[in-house]
Image (cartoon, coloured by chain):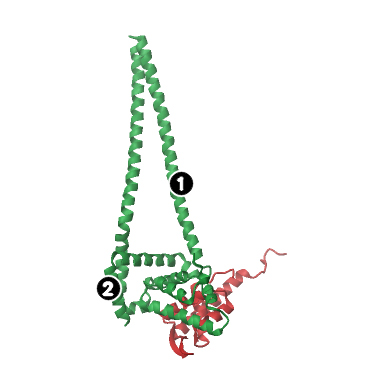
Amino acid sequence: MKGVARMTRQEFIVTLREGIRKLPPEEIVAATEFYEEYFDEVLEAGEKTEEEIVSELGNPKRIASQIKAEYAARLLDGDESLLDKKPTVRKRLSAAWWVIIGIVSAPVSIPIAICAVLVLFGAGCAVVGLAAGIIGSAVAGLGCTVFGFVALADAASSGVMMIGLGLIALAASVAAGAGLFLGVRAAVRTIAKAIRRSREKHRMKRLAEEKAAGEEWVYVSRADEEEKAFLQEIAADAAEAENAENAERALVERGEGNA
Amino acid sequence: MAFKIESSLLDACALAILKRGDTYGYEITQEMKSAIRISESTLYPVLRRLQKEGLCRTYDQPYQGRNRRYYSITEKGEAQLLEYRKQWEDYKRAINKLMDGNERGGKND
């Protein structure tokens, strides 16, 4: 892995630009200019080398995320200056985002959801089937026992055998029922635990990411800002992957709007 | 620093620095860093936000064969700074009231 400390100024700028390439051109230019100027200023002060400045600034990917999050927050808060400039594109994009997110996530999430529902349904059917079988055998055992008592008067040995068979069937049914109950309870608990664990894992991952995003950077690590950035990220990815043509057009329009 | 600095507080600090006179990014960073512990890369989004909200504007001035981007507080920015200062006073007073070490009067003696 390449350490940030060994990155050159050029690599830093390239990585930064790469990280924010989906933002409007003016945002990319502004950020690049700011950091280029920052390098110039510090170098002219003559106290630090290029590499030292890079390592002080930190991971350009992280900086790119901050800029994206800040942009997303501005965009979704309905920043006036953004609205003035390109109302139609902005509105159309944000409306289209949700549609695109839906389309893109559908081929992945719907089959998974269907599978999960089918598996659960199958397991439910199996449990119901087993339960029906057990109840059936219990009823049969009970019937057998009762019939045995009735038959006792006429044919003692057959009656006793029937009673014996019926009681065995009853006992087996009760045992199977208890087993089924315990099994289902254990399965439900296991599933619940697995879900809880995966949620916990997800949460921990989020926390870790949040922490990695910077200690002093309170602003972007606030949950809602992060969510907005995340949404924007997904939407941008989706627009690129699913609807490259539209995204291209939007970019061209945006470019014209700036010109 | 034990306390996290909220974005609005960063905005207020940046505006206060600009209120003293037009200056450029590196100098703003240095001034911020002289008072609070922030990372070098924290300032850009702050300035960008202020600029986009019309609280400051920028202009370029040639300096040693390149451009230096100066930031200048706008009227809207000054109004916002005034508001921030007022709120900061309230906030400071409120926290100080809780933080001062005086013991509760009623229970003593």
Residue B82 seen in the current view: no
Find residue A138 and report its image quarter: top left
What amino acid is labelled 2 in the image? Arg
Q: Position of residue A84 (x, y in %)?
A: 33, 79
Classify the position of the C terminus of chain A by image quarter: bottom left
What amino acid is labelled 1 in the image? Lys
A77 left or right of A106?
Answer: right
Which residue is at 29% across, 80% downward? A256
Find residue A127 and report its image quarter: top left
Q: Residues within 10 Å of mark 2 (few under 14, many from 20)?
A: few
A7 left or right of A164?
Answer: right
Q: Secondary structure at mark 1?
A: helix
A180 left or right of B2?
Answer: left
Which of A43/B41 is in front? A43
Using the image, determine if residue A68 lies above or below residue B16.
Answer: above
Q: Mark 1 and mark 2 in contact? Answer it, CB < 8 Å.
A: no
Q: For chain A, give the colour.
A: green
Q: Position of residue A26 (x, y in %)?
A: 37, 79
Q: Position of residue B54 (x, y in %)?
A: 41, 82
Residue A225 seen in the current view: yes
Q: Residues within 10 Å of mark 1 (few under 14, many from 20)?
A: few
Which residue is at 55% across, 81% downward? B30
Q: Secondary structure at mark 2?
A: helix
Report in which chain the residue with disc 2 lies. A
Residue occupied by mark 2: A249
Q: Which mark is residue A193?
A: 1
Q: For chain B, give the colour.
A: red
Using the image, determine if residue A191 lies above or below residue A134.
Answer: below
Which residue is at 35% across, 43% downward? A120
